[in-house]
Image (cartoon, helix red, strand yellow):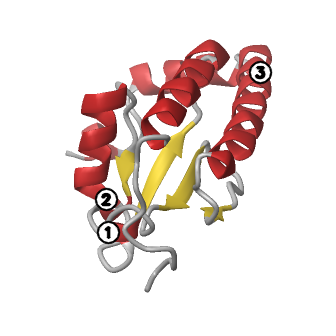
Amino acid sequence: AQNLFICAPHASQVAAIGALEGGLELEKNLKVYRQNRQSLLEALPAMGFDQIGPPDGAFYIYANISRWSDDSVAFCKDVLEKAGVAITPGLDFDPVRGHHTVRFSYARGSEEIREGIKRLADFMASQIPIRETCFG
């Protein structure tokens, strides 16, 4: 058994070396993600998402939806069905407050992010708030 578990499999070691050689590609992705993050940070408040967790190092943004829903799962399903935009319920990450939050990923191409923003903005324009105070 020792020979099987003493180190990472050869294929994993080769893959790791290959990953370390992808610096230029990684920098290109980081640049795109920075642009996408900025696009979302500008667009989301205009749609009413005015309580946003600062994206400090990942490639997603948490936003409060309690103005419109107490059920982040249902809210995300509605956005997907009616706007064709996939967002993630906060409940997947926080069982206590996640009912009131969603997560927007910006790890896509910029054109896809712009299209998603347009679709989401059209969807949100039709939403009627259930309350004006958040986490109330």
Does 96 appear above or below 118?
A: below
Quadrant location, the C terminus: bottom left
Q: Do the residues labelled 2 and 3 touch (CB within 8 Å)?
A: no
Does 84 appear above or below 128?
A: above
Under circle 2, the secondary element is: helix
Tell me where residue 54 appears, x and y as whole percent.
70, 60
Nearest the eye: 99 or 27: 99
Taking the spot 67% from the left edge, 47% from the top edge, the residue there is: 46
Residue under label 1:
99
Measured in 3D between alpha carbons, the distance from the residue under mark 2 to the one under mark 1, in whole angstroms, is: 5 Å
Taking the spot 42% from the left edge, 69% from the top edge, the residue there is: 66
Q: Do the residues labelled 3 and 1 touch (CB within 8 Å)?
A: no
Tell me where residue 114 appears, x and y as whole percent.
62, 21
Of badges 2 and 3, nearer the viewer stands 2
Residue under label 2:
72
Kind of residue at badge 3: Gly
Q: Are marks 2 and 1 in contact (CB under 8 Å)?
A: yes
Measured in 3D between alpha carbons, the distance from the residue under mark 2 to the one under mark 3, in whole angstroms, is: 37 Å
Residue under label 3:
23
